[in-house]
């Protein structure tokens, strides 16, 4: 299986951002690839992501930095293709003044980062301004999906119950996100609840993310992300919360926090509200299974898009060495 010419069909499990990116990468490097997924990409966690390039709730740090950096470069390239749904936008990230955030190491030089000290509700912070990729999921996921099919990939919708049996017939790349709790009996995986809402676009909104909002619980944050057709407001990061019900009180707290940061946001009319369960894990599992012809690529937490191209490149290297 070291070269594509040997042509054993590879099965990629999952059609979220990890599965689609990995499948496309393998296909573009000459392998025959079939995606098998329980759900269409529209019904995945990936479809509920915000999404910007930003390494959030994903470990281990050194690898996440490397994968995020590689992905930034690829997203910059995709930003030159209007139908990809990727663009480079100005963004602000607010961090405590006494911490040096690790994500700075993942940011390429061209991101033009600047910083200034600010005070929010009496506490000191640094506001980092930089240019980062915006990934409009409702355009980007269909773009990846269609490109995969146009290049000769195939997709089959089916739930896989026994991954080891499948791996006896094909090399398998496991991109099932939270699905690996059952599929691989992985006890290190857990959901991280994220609630967002969409509002009307406001002219000239600059996106912002603020994880450690003063006087608020650790698992509630404030961010707003301007898309071409709306602005997304968030959010939450409740570990081990499985419910996908919309919490109206949380919606109001999100609005209040975001308005404090940008009073111009048009929050009177909510277009829709969403909940997604991020696939949290002690650390991203990207490795070959010691007992079977399976490469795992799941557990990307709040950074599935951010690390997607870096992880896919590493899967390719592992496949070449199978
Ligand atoms: C509110 C919110 C905001 C976010 N914002 C960002 C952001 O700004 N930037 C960022 O990088 N990330 C963000 N994320 C995180 C990101 O969405 C996830 O990390 C990413 O979607 C995980 O993708 P995945 O492909 O690994 O999993 P998923 O999207 O969950 O896809 C898993 C796939 O596996 C399939 N599957 C599962 N089990 C089986 C089985 N047994 N057999 C066959 N198929 C199976 C599913 O059907 C699905 O197709 C956000 C997430 C949320 C919820």
Image: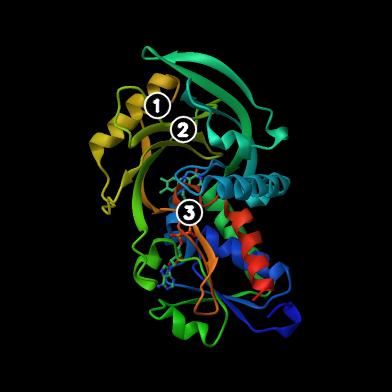
Quarter that holds the C terminus: bottom right
Mark 3: which secondary structure?
Answer: loop
How far, Cα to Cα, is label 1 from label 2?
7 Å
The mark that comes first in sequence, 1 or 2, is 2
* Ligand 1 lies in quarter: bottom left
Quarter that holds the N terminus: bottom right
Picture quarter containing residue 216? top left
Q: What percent of the width, then of the height, locates residue 266?
A: 42, 27
As rendered, which of 272 and 173 lies closer to the eye? 173
Q: What percent of the width, then of the height, locates residue 32?
A: 66, 78
The mark that comes first in sequence, 3 or 1, is 1
Residue at numbered disc 2: 224
How far, Cα to Cα, is label 2 from label 3?
21 Å
Residue at numbered disc 1: 258
Q: Relative to residue 250, is residue 302 depicted above or below?
A: below
Q: Are marks 1 and 2 in contact (CB under 8 Å)?
A: yes
Query: What residue lies at 35% left-to-right and 22% top-to-bottom?
Result: 214
Q: What percent of the width, then of the height, locates residue 19?
A: 54, 64
Crowding at mark 2 (Cα within 10 Å: few <14, some 14-19, many 20+): many
Disc number placed over residue 300 in the picture, else none: 3
The mark that comes first in sequence, 2 or 3, is 2
């Amino acid at each position: 299986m070291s070269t594509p010419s040997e042509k054993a069909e590879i099965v990629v499990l999952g059609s979220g951002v990890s599965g689609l990116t990995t499948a496309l990468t393998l296909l573009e490097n000459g392998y025959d690839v079939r995606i098998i997924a329980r759900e269409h990409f529209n019904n995945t966690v990936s479809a509920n992501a915000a999404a910007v390039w930003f390494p959030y709730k994903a470990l281990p740090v050194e690898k996440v930095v490397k994968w995020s950096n590689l992905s930034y470069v690829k997203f910059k390239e995709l930003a030159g293709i209007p139908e990809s749904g990727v663009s480079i936008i100005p963004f602000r990230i607010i961090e405590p003044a006494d911490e040096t955030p690790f994500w700075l190491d993942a940011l390429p030089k061209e991101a033009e980062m600047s910083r200034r000290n600010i005070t929010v509700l009496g506490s000191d912070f640094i506001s980092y301004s930089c240019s980062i990729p915006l990934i409009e999921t409702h355009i980007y996921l269909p773009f990846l999906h269609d490109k995969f099919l146009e290049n000769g990939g195939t997709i089959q919708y089916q739930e896989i119950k026994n991954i080891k049996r499948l791996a006896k017939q094909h090399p398998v790349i496991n991109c099932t996100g939270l699905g690996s709790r059952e599929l691989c009996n992985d006890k290190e995986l857990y959901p991280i609840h994220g609630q967002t809402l969409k509002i009307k676009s406001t002219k000239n909104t600059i996106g912002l993310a603020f994880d450690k909002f003063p006087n608020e619980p650790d698992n509630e944050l404030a961010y707003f992300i301007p898309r071409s057709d709306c602005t997304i407001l968030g959010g939450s990061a409740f570990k081990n919360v499985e419910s996908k019900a919309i919490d109206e009180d949380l919606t109001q707290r999100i609005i209040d926090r975001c308005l404090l940061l940008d009073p111009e946001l048009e929050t009177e009319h909510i277009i829709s509200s969403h909940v997604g369960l991020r696939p949290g894990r002690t650390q991203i599992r990207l490795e070959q299974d010691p007992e079977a012809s399976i490469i795992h690529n799941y557990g990307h937490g709040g950074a599935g898009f951010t690390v997607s191209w870096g992880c896919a490149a590493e899967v390719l290297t592992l496949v070449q060495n199978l």
